[in-house]
Image (spheres, rainbow, N blue to C red):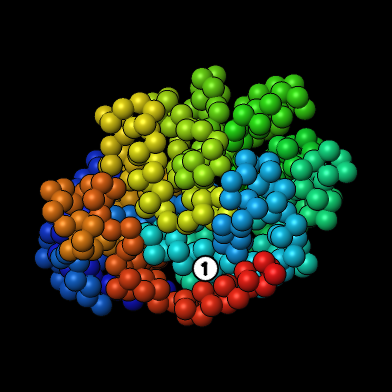
Amino acid sequence: MTGDVTLRNARLVLTMDDGARELAGVDIRLSNGVIAEIGAALDPVGEIVDASGCLVTPGLVNTHHHLYQTLTRAVPGGQDALLFGWLKTLYPIWARFGPEDMRISALAGLAELALSGCTLTSDHLYLFPNGARLDDTIDAAREIGMRFHPTRGAMSIGESDGGLPPDSLVERDAAILEDCIRVIDAHHDPAEGAMVRVGVAPCSPFSVSRELMRDSALLARDKGVMLHTHLAENEEDIAYSHEMFGCRPGQYAEDLGWTGEDVWHAHCVKLDGDEIDLFARSRTGVAHCPCSNCRLGSGIAPVRAMRDAGVKVGLGVDGSASNDAGNLVAEARQAMLLQRVMHGADKMSAREALWIATRGGAEVLGRDDCGQIAVGKRADLALWDLDTIEAAGSWDPAALLLAGPTRVRHLFVEGRQVVRDGHVTTIDLPRVIETQNARAAQLAS
Ligand SMILES: [Zn+2]
């Protein structure tokens, strides 16, 4: 429970509500974790925050990440590798991680997201070496105060069975499902305003068995949680699907129960027209990760075609090892730019890309209580200082992705201030960075 906060006289509020209203000079009152009131010259209640120089947007929503990877950024052997070679370089390093590495890397990744405007993030953790657990990342999210959708990932096909990961990083199907049940029962909150929702997320069709994919879908539906994995990321991925399963990834997903409004897939760079129709029809979501796709040379996802067909699309920074940044507002700009490269400057506006980064992501994660600024919705808000050099001379305060800061001035999650004047308030960030760097150096030696 948090006290009341009144944001005074916002220069502009991009609501992302159903009417896409843009409100100038209004106040917003936050109370008990929700947006209680929006209007001009409200009675100042609780703490007053001057928003007169700020653009206010809903908190951005990150739909795909591997927080643990913030400990393995810019690893020399993986810098210029393609996806499968990149994975093979990093697996042995990740195999040395333990619980504290998972917690500290998650804290660093979450802080970076918060500073870039993110209030709700999912995470995909699919390896659990040396006693690491999903709970380690949930602890980190609670500590920093971020709304969190961790997904219990898994790999079950090791090198000796023709898979990509080393045998030491794979688990048995039964143990995976058992731990999924444990973390759902321990942490998943289906209620409106939930701060933690757990998902089930085998790593990818090329690292788990067909049976585990099918059983994961059955388990998730039984428990009422969402499903997530990587799909159709690049040409190697499509070739693997044809060779091993005799079909395209969309068909494989559909056959195993991996379509529906409770499912979202990361990347989907190589979805064809039929698969886009399938995703639209079935209300299956997509986590678009433009920087990662550029970084690994995977291609440009058909986001324009997906959106035109009615597919739910959100943004993901993806793991820091393949981005290597975790700046979500920068990711939104990249999404806009890539669609323009593909289709022309009139095919993705700054406003549309920001909608994808907020409301779009909330839809993908099944959160109709987040992603927009409206009375009764959760008090997750990002305040962007427009009196900074990045926005100086801008004629349009709403065009944040064309001319605007890439760090927030203030950030509220569930009405609680997580960033104040550009600094994270809830954790000792310099200490986290120091610990993170010391551990990275240790892993590199
Ligand atoms: Zn990923």
- Up the image or down, 24 lies above or below 238; here it is below
Classify residue 215 as left or right of residue 221.
right
The amino acid pointed to by label 1 is Ala
Q: How many marks?
A: 1
The percent coordinates of residue 284 (x first, y second) are 54, 34
- Up the image or down, 270 lies above or below 222; here it is above
Front residue (pair 156, 120):
156
- The quarter of the rendered structure image containing the N terminus is bottom left
Q: Which residue is mark 1?
A: 108
Disc 1: CA contacts within 10 A as few (<14), some (14-19) or many (>=20): many
What residue lies at 80% left-to-right and 41% top-to-bottom?
A: 163
What residue lies at 76% left-to-right and 43% top-to-bottom?
A: 164
Q: Quadrant of residue 13?
A: bottom left
- The quarter of the rendered structure image containing the C terminus is bottom right
Front residue (pair 430, 367):
430
Q: Is residue 400 visible?
A: yes
Which residue is outermost to the top? 274
Q: Secondary structure at mark 1?
A: helix
The percent coordinates of residue 388 (x first, y second) are 21, 63
Classify residue 273 as left or right of residue 15.
right
The percent coordinates of residue 99 (x first, y second) are 69, 70
Classify residue 208 as left or right of residue 341.
right
What residue lies at 28% left-to-right and 62% top-to-bottom?
A: 383
